[in-house]
Amino acid sequence: MTMEGEAREGLAATLLRVLIPVVLALIVGGLLLLALGKDPIGYYGYVLQRSLLRWGGVQETLTRMAPLLLIAAGLMVAFRAGIWNLGGDGQFLLAAVASAALAPALAPVLPRGANLVVCMIVGSLVGALWSLLPALLKARYGVNEIITTLMMSFLGTSLANVMIKLVLRDPDTTVPQTRSLAVDDRLPRLFGTTIHCGLVLAILAVILVHLMMTRTAFGLKLQVLGANRAAAVHAGFRVQRLTVASFALSAGLIGLGGAVEVLGVWGTVRADWNPALGLLVVPLVFLARFNGYAVIGFTLFFSALIVGGESAARRVGVPQHYVLVLVALLLLFLALVEYLDQSRRKLKVA
Amino acid sequence: MTALFTEPFLVSLLFGAVTAGLPLLLAGLGEQISEKAGVLNIGLEGMMLVGAYTGFLATYRTGSFWLGFLAGGAGGMAAALIVLFLCIRKGLNQIVIGIAVTVGAEGLTSLLHFVQFSRTYPRLPAAPALALPLLSRIPVLGKGLFSHNALVYLSVILVGALTWMFRSTYLGLSLEAAGNKPAALDAAGVDVIRTRSFAVLCTGFLAGLGGAYMANVGAGLFVPFITGGAGVIGIVLAMLARGRPLWVLIGAALFGASLAMTTALQVAGIDIPTDVVQMLPFAVVMLVLVIFARNSMLPPALGSPYVRGER
């Protein structure tokens, strides 16, 4: 997956290279639906109508985007720095639990705004903290971060449950969950809609990360690190520090995603709740080739698919898992188109 | 605490540990073969899931457990073909394609399950067990370790066979070279692409077999997402084992035991969240990594495609 030469290419060519995989995935997915005896046109029509053509659906789609965007921002930092942070789920959940536990406790003491800011900061710190061990092991000893982040993710998911069941449990509910944050104390909603202001924060985060990676010295250093570790060492960068910093930034943003989802939407975390978004966002970031603006576009598309797909499971009789098939097809076709494009360019050079 | 040391408790713990550990063992061994050859198979979970589905389907339709295992292996290999074609032949990013395989398998098997079985949720009869002569008569150990499906014993034999293959056969050396210095293997006249393709197909077969065991013997049914992270644990086991099959066996036993412990404790009526026990093996492994941290000794060419003449 190369990123070089993106800027030099025309917008039309880039759009085409993104649209072709999307269209192919929708077609092949539709054929699969047909083979299973479902009506693909009806399904796609319903999903589109439900998630993007109705005001209620649009609000749901936009609300769903907030955590996805923050996770994507976190992954953009890590992947560009050549770090495979695959432990997003643990970082997300622990941050969610931390902010869910803290917010109702601080609500009587702090004013709403201050409380929310504190909880979001704590959420990010918890997320970042959960990446510290993989970061240090990678920086100091070169221990492969794929295994360590995956293991920390399992640990974090279980730890979140243990905390809810044993320590933070609300004594007044039958299902183990944290104490609920009153609706009035949650993230404020935008202009009388059901969309909370975490969405604005998330969009800003993606854009800022994009600008940081492309316009600042720090971002450039991370990119060099990602492209060629030996070159980064040779250039005299403090590679260990950079590694830990990008881990912390990545996991911190993912943790912020967990905090925002809890403070904006749920107000509590139930035991065994795990949206498992970490791996699902990976393809989006790759589809967008680490470009922040493209990430926002793809997240909108993906969010609409989830919202529409969930509803279609009840109405049209196509289980929401079909969305996973679409994502996989999208990745495969994207990879193929990219490959064909590269070999065509190589031919030209030769 | 006395309830912990009764015979039924210990037997169910041991038996459960083997049942839960075997899919991890097979997947871990499979992943190890790929990693040796320089292919990082993040799609392991997906291969297991496809194997679980095809294995269940075959046994459900034919009634034969062995056909189910074969079909499971074949299903895993079918999923591996995607990795073979896109990553090994075309050199595309192994992690991205691996995630695609896993996500796609999750979606596809859930969808197929929904269409075929969501109303009936059919169950299989108990799988045939082979009680080893003499050994199975040892108290506790006999029922816990030596009264399992024949696939369990075959898998343990496989551990020995792989150790021998890695160490002292031409094939084993070729695999190792494909991961360490593919260009050297190429110069020696062995086709790197073919060697890696073989490795990935082996991985697919073993992962699919593990999935089929999980569905047919462990659970007796197929449900969406039945593998529940077993493939990820398999990847972790293979990476920690640093190329030694015996270590995969030890790791799989450790993880299997802690998975079995959660159910066994509930049977014994001890009320602690299962999550606590599930954390243990991961916590132990992280601790070991922190204390003995050094380079994880993975093949240098792991994850990078081989293009002849490119440096």
Image: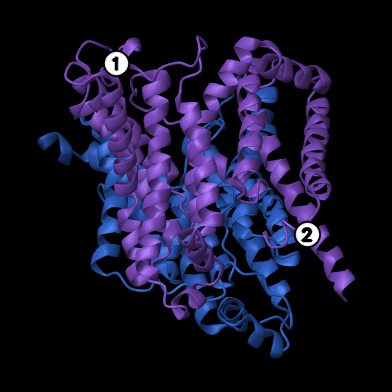
Relative vertical location of residue B190 with respect to residue A349 in this rendering, above or below:
below
User: Any idea which chain is the blue one in this picture?
Assistant: B
Residue type at tag 2: Tyr
Circle 2 residue = A339
Q: Quadrant of residue A345?
A: bottom right
What subunit carries mark 2? A
Relative vertical location of residue B193 with respect to residue A204 in this rendering, above or below:
below
Circle 1 residue = A180
Q: Quadrant of residue B20?
A: top left
Q: Can I make out residue B280 in this image?
A: yes
Residue type at tag 1: Ser
Task: Give residue B6's mark.
Answer: none
Q: Quadrant of the C terminus of chain A?
A: bottom right
Q: Quadrant of the N terminus of chain A?
A: bottom right
Circle 2 residues within 10 Å: few <14, some 14–19, many ≥20: some
Rounded to the nearest angstrom, the CA distance separating label 2 from label 1 is 50 Å
Relative vertical location of residue A84 with respect to residue A285 in this rendering, above or below:
below
Circle 1 residues within 10 Å: few <14, some 14–19, many ≥20: some
Earlier sequence position, callout 2 versus callout 1:
1
Q: Residue at x 49, y 16 (%)?
A: A190
How does the figure colour the protein chain or chains? by chain
Q: Can I make out residue B59 in this image?
A: no
Horizontal and vertical percent position of residue B55 = 63, 42
Q: Residue at x 42, y 77 (%)?
A: A236
SS class of the residue under badge 2? helix
Left-right relation of B263 to A302: left
